[in-house]
Image (cartoon, coloured by chain):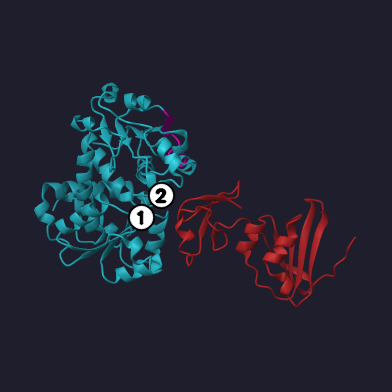
Chain colours: A cyan, B red
Amino acid sequence: MGEGKVGLSSLKGRHFVDALDLSQAEYDLLFSLAEDIMESPQDYAHCCSGKILATIFYEPSTRTRLSFEAAMLRLGGRVITVADAATSSVAKGESLADTIRTVAGYADLIVLRHPKEGAAKLAAMYSPVPLINGGDGAREHPTQTLTDLFTIKRYKGRLEGLTVAFCGDLRYGRTVHSLIRALALREGIRFILISPAELRLPRAIVEEILETNPGLGLVETEDLEVGLSEADVLYMTRIQKERFFNEEDYIRLRDSYILTRRKLEGAKENLLVMHPLPRVTEITHDVDEDPRAIYFQQARNGMFVRMALIASLLGVV
Amino acid sequence: MLKVDRIQLGIVLDHIQAGKGFLIFQELGLSSRKEPTALLMNVPSSKMGKKDMIKVSGVLDLDLTKLGLLDPGITVNYIEGGEVIRKVKPGLPERVVGLIKCKNPRCITSTESYQEPIFTLVDKENKEYQCHFCGERVRV
């Protein structure tokens, strides 16, 4: 195993519910370990032998759940899963705390996805085993942040001094919230926030990141073209139907931004087009052929960096 | 002016913002006490113009967090032998458990009712607290 494991012992037994639960140094160590796993997967193929990961999903998920499960299986561990917890334990009236305490008796590590904001924080209070937030409502999705930062670092070689444009649903997009808070800590970062007025980044997050980094560059616009010409990274997001109480609002806003190959003509040659997936209409399929579109590589990177996270929280590296 | 006798043993809540005395009286459950208890409203004050006061005779276990939340400017005077032996200004509490309800319908505390809401003071000037779970901010 490579140098990536140095210092990771600090992660053993910890929860990961918020993007800021890890220091910049810990993120960098996880990225080194993930690189090492990508280069020498055979060295890690049995490190979680005898360990069990439980995935509890109260909301539908394809990528996150499969990514975690594939990650654990590739580390030699086993997986137990509740893919639709909302119709099983909740239907019987069981509290989240009781579900977590019960499952913690079966597994060494838990991944939780829940539609309510702060669910992972509450669950972690009752979990005697490490708990990972697999997404809680519109609030946080820290392992997507891990994926996104790892991807930017792999392709750009750095996380500092970048102009990062976020486009789409910045109000309810939990992947955006987590990534912005983590990136704001890096030096020389500039954000371009592109969204309809109704879906702007919550003021509390704007205030928080400006407090964290008063020198942060931040532009808010409704014009995608502005972001495209200046960005090093363009982070597209889906307008999420499930976050709206009112379907009329969703229908009105869902096609606010559509990135096409033609629109990319005005962008930098070395731009990275990222997306947490699933994509609906916001990126046309012809963009997939553009070498700047890296969202499928991004999804694959997520599995390797989740392997690094699982191994570190279990203390097996 | 209205006169209320000095108390020998008890608590005097002073510098209550005028108009808030009755609310604090209710919130502290003072109406059910057997000992002499007085609520004074609109008392002339050199600093505040008008203020409310509460005098409680006997032993009372005060929740200073709650009191600070209800009126951060309040002064608690502990009386023994007819003299003030200790003054406490609770101020706005840094952390509040179970006293503020999160108004965000998407917050986990809206459905997991066994969990007491936890709030942390984030903006003293604007009396703003933040929910530990969902991050929602509320003014008290």
Nearer to us in this view, A190 or A268: A268
Mark 1 in CB contact with mark 2 (< 8 angstroms): no
Identified by mark 2, the residue type is Arg
Tell me if residue A211 is in the magenta stretch: yes
Residue topped by disc 2: A139
Q: Using the rendered image, report if marks 1 and 2 lie on a common chain.
A: yes
For the C terminus of chain A, give its image quadrant.
Answer: bottom left
Residue nearer the viewer, A246 or B93? A246
Q: Residue A235 bears which disc, if any?
A: none
Identify the residue at the far right of this view: B1
Residue A252 appears at what percent x and percent y?
Answer: 43, 36
Q: CA distance from mark 1 to mark 2?
A: 10 Å
Q: Is residue B86 left or right of residue A68?
A: right
User: Mark 1 — residue?
Assistant: A17
Magenta-highlighted residues: A210-222
Q: Is residue A204 visible?
A: yes
Q: Secondary structure at mark 1?
A: loop
Pinpoint the chain carrying mark 2.
Answer: A
Q: Nearer the viewer, residue A267 or A315?
A: A267
Q: Residue at x 31, y 66 (%)?
A: A129
Residue at the left extreme?
A42
Of tags 1 and 2, the one toward the viewer is 2
